[in-house]
Amino acid sequence: MTLKRRAFLQRTGLALGALGLSGTALLASSSQYQQALAKPARRRLALLIGINAYPDRALDPGVAQDIALKGCITDVELQRQLLVHRFGFQPGDVVTLTNQDATRDSILTAIDEHLVQQARSDDVVLLHFSGYGSQVRVAGIEAAANNAVDTVGAMGAEEVAVQEGFQAAWVTVDSRLPSEGNPALGDLLEAEIIARLAPLATANLTTVIDAGSQDVGYLRWGNARVRSRPTVPTGLVPSTVASALDLAAPWPGLVLRAAQVGRLVLESHWDSFSAGVFTYALTQSLWEAEPDPTSQLLLQRTGQRLQRWVGADQQPNLSDRLPPRGGPAAYNLAPQLPPAAGVVLPGGDSRPLTAWLGGVPPQVLRYLQPGTRLVAELDQERLVPLGLESRTGLKALVRLLEDDLEDTEALPPSALARRPIFEQVRRLPQNIDLVVALDSQLKRVERVDATSALAGIPLVSSVTAGEKAADCLFGRLPIGPTSTLTAALPGGTETLPGSGGDARGASQGGERPAESSYGLFAPNRTLLPGTMLSRDEAVKTAVNRLTPTLKTLLALKLVRLTENHAASQVGAAAVLEAVQPKPKPLLVQTTERSRTLTWPVTIRQAQKAAVTDPIMLPRDCRISYHLANTSTQPLHLLWISFDSRGECTALMTLPDAIAEDGAEVPPVATPLDPGQIFTFPADGAGWAMPGAAVWVEAHIIFSTQPLERCLAALGNNPPSLATGFRPVRQPLRLAQALLQDLSASTDADSKSAANDYYALHHDRWATLSFRYDIA
């Protein structure tokens, strides 16, 4: 009653005989996970803590805002599902403490009893905390800390904080602010947790902290929420622990922080759920990671997601005190399932089945329609087709597609429990709009005017900031204490709040826009360069002026919906390489489910040499791309590039415009042949950084079918290798044409246009994406 893998590959056109690969080689990737299962058993212990519901006394009774967080319980579930289903933790070995159960005493007791007392020398331990963090000033420790730290140059951020008398702490559900009558600090100091973990028998400890300690003065940051207490209390270390506490002790093992101590940490709202942006990005990266990713590579991939979601405001941080061994693996453990979109959850033999979709990119998950096709991997030989019926948050109801099964063997639903699932056909609505959040700092009349003006733009809608997921923010410059806002900026630079690269680009001219000007911001309140004027204007006038930018943002949103490097079955790879001033590979993207067993030498060398730090290119840098077709059929290519200035450029592979006899050649894209590698630009000189842009996001589309609508959208003289990148006058039209081309690749999908949805088959295209910042 299951679809054989061989039949599945034949149906999707992925048979690899033309590459000279043996049939057994197809299973090489899966066998790596079987080897992981055969290793000697190590116990895996986890303690997951998440607090949404805080009482007023834990923060500040004077804060006239909704203090409840929204995403910390989701964080716990994101980690639990990942640990149990991808990393092989036993459900009983994963202890969770949420909301009212996450008191100071219960957390310390769980660390003692569940982690320290049970873990043996080779076991794996994970500790996770999501909630409010705090930066507290411990009275009377400045001098002691100064004596403990000799040289400022050798200090990390945490040591600097200690020297200044500050301590990072977790705000528990029973925390309270110190008072004159009771000056003891009520938070759980990280130093106390470090002391409790000191007797742990294993070095294989990973601590994940999705909480902040920066006093930003706000609980909201654009369309996101801040995970740090908005005040810095001063108090005494509780007398019960003061004598045994080393306030300068480092964390043991591997520590993955949502941001460096003292920096901004955010949670955001997605479709029907909220989550910490760090935890969501981290678990997404781990669902798609190959075996044994190093923690540095994991952090780079997580940071790239954060850059896209919240800009440069929040940068994840890693500290590692594990024994040197070529870089520790993420979570000190190899995954036991292959990279996947999610997993079928246990549920007996009831139908429909419930699936966890923690590995589906959030921008795609938001729009997945009923009828989306998935497959569950029953074993190395069998894939079971599933259809999406409905979804709530990260869980979906799916049903067996029995009409597509090839044999009649009975298959109870329980047989699919804990099996990985993958996307096969991505179904998306055709009426996707751009959601604009209206800044809460706008006056009521301004919000009314903006709502009315935005309603007149096709495919644009508006919401109140914080109400639901949004793609951008309409508002003014933030109003608040200068010192607080300056402290939120990387390096303490006095520029626009929430600025990473974007606001730097906006303020380099030296003229700060007046507060009466309107503009567009990223959801985290990063100003989009060029969208704000230095003169006053009416709301409706501003919306009219910003309409082209809104259409470009919608185009970017639509192109991002085609990204599928983790799901595509088309053999393709791309390398972003710096040519000048120093040649080196920067980023590598490959299609992980394409069953390409041996990537070309160029790709393999780049994978080994690619940098693992965040990509920040100098202004004088020149770059090139290497593209490889490792499939068995020609692939048509299209580049679409967006940058921080709101500009869109494109490039297609086209034949020469004039034939040998002088006749004009019809505009038909030239495909990349199987086994072929292209280097662009071919002259080796590379492309220069674009103008005053401070970030670039490039999408490279490989398609088994000609992209005829895209070609038409680019006009009579489309950009080619000979002309180089050219500006796209109508980016939205091009993005819509791309979705139409990818959806209309077979006659079987002709119904999609009539049914108002796109049906994108992962065996017919791959979109590989790159984003880099420019200094």
Image (tube, grey):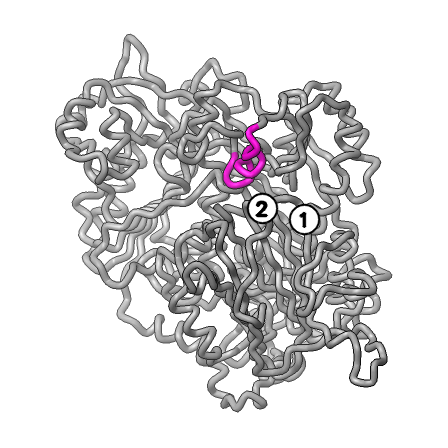
Q: Which residue is mark 2?
A: 693
- Which amino acid lies under the numbered mark 1 shown in the image of this protein? Glu
Q: Is residue 491 visible?
A: yes
Residue 593 within the segment the image draws in magenta: no
Of marks 1 and 2, which one's residue comes earlier in the chain? 1
Real-space CA distance between mark 1 and mark 2, rounded to the nearest whole angstrom: 9 Å
Spot occupied by residue 415 in the image (x, y as percentages of width and height)? 53, 70
Spot occupied by residue 192 in the image (x, y as percentages of width and height)? 23, 33
Q: Is residue 96 left or right of residue 159?
A: right
State whether residue 710 is above or below residue 105.
below
Residue 509 within the segment the image draws in magenta: yes
Which residue occupies the foreground of this view, 623 or 218? 623
Q: Is residue 472 left or right of residue 300?
A: right
Residue beneath the point at 47% across and 73% down: 603
Residue beneath the point at 26% across and 47% down: 115
Which residue occupies the foreground of this view, 683 or 562? 683
Asked whether the residues under the numbered discs 1 and 2 touch, taking CB atoms below 8 Å apart as contact, a structural biologist would say yes
Q: Residues within 10 Å of mark 2 (few under 14, many from 20)?
A: many
Q: Is residue 401 visible?
A: no
Q: Quadrant of the N terminus?
A: bottom right
| Extreme-top residue of the structure | 181
Q: Which residue is mark 1?
A: 647
Residue beneath the point at 70% across and 53% down: 558
Res 705 label: none
Q: Check disc 2 and report its element: helix, strand or loop.
A: loop
The part of the image, by quadrant, that contains residue 322 is bottom left
State whether residue 116 is above or below residue 754.
above
State whether residue 76 is above or below residue 1.
above
